[in-house]
Amino acid sequence: SEAGMPGMSDPGYELIASAISAGIKVVSVPGPSAILTALVVSGLPVHQFSYFGFLPRSPGERRRLLSSIAEERRTLVVFEAPHRLKESLEDIAKVLGDRKIAVCREMTKLHEEVFRGSVSDALAHFGQPRGEFTLVIAGKEPNSQSSDVHEDIRDEVNSLRRQGMRLKEAVAFVGAASGVSKRVLYDKCKSSRPIEQEKRKCDVDVCQLETVRAITAEE
């Protein structure tokens, strides 16, 4: 593979799995790996890390993935194409916060570049991105507050609640589908109240007020 370490930087997994199933001996010859190279030069902790491949192309799916790993304390590694880099950095800033990041371009190649700084700094630096990118993102700090859950995911919870589902059940369902921590999602959604519930609460308050007025009038 000219794109990096076979099976890590390309869809070689299916070929490897098929070869193993067919009884064909598979041997790895170590080669250039953008993942490990970027980790080593990032300046971020490398004792534990999580690799997520290319970020989803769809903005909604990308934000859901980022929300699902917002509580991850290990260093995060993802790939990104140049034409999506700025959008992805913007989503990272919104969902994960303005964390430390190393944006590594064209790793192991002639025009290799490593930018280290915050996510906002990286956005300002890459005006016209070119080449293939490996992003090494700092994990969540142990003493930092919970990252915000993206609005799309909170909307899914409230949509289920409007259909009559209890908050705990809606959080469990959406949390399992999105990968977001159920505890974090519950904390973010418990203060919100669907429109129908607000209306029912108002109706109950009106009924209670009318009852009090009726009793007062009889007395």
Image (cartoon, rainbow, N blue to C red):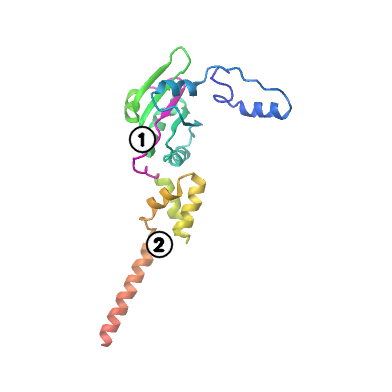
Q: Which residues lie in the magenta part?
A: 127-149
Give amino acid for label 1.
Answer: Ala
**Which residue carries the number 2 mark?**
196
Location of the N terminus (image quadrant): top right
Q: Residue 143 location, x and y as percent?
A: 34, 40
Examine the image and state in which quarter residue 44 appears: top left
> Quick check: is 131 in the magenta stretch?
yes
Give amino acid for label 2.
Answer: Glu
Q: Residue 137 location, x and y as percent?
A: 41, 30
Q: Earlier in the sequence, mark 1 or mark 2?
A: 1
**Secondary element type, mark 2:** helix
Q: Is residue 119 in view?
A: yes
Q: Classify 62 as above or below 154.
A: above
Left or right of residue 51: residue 198: left
Magenta segment's dominant SS is: loop
**Which residue carries the number 1 mark?**
93
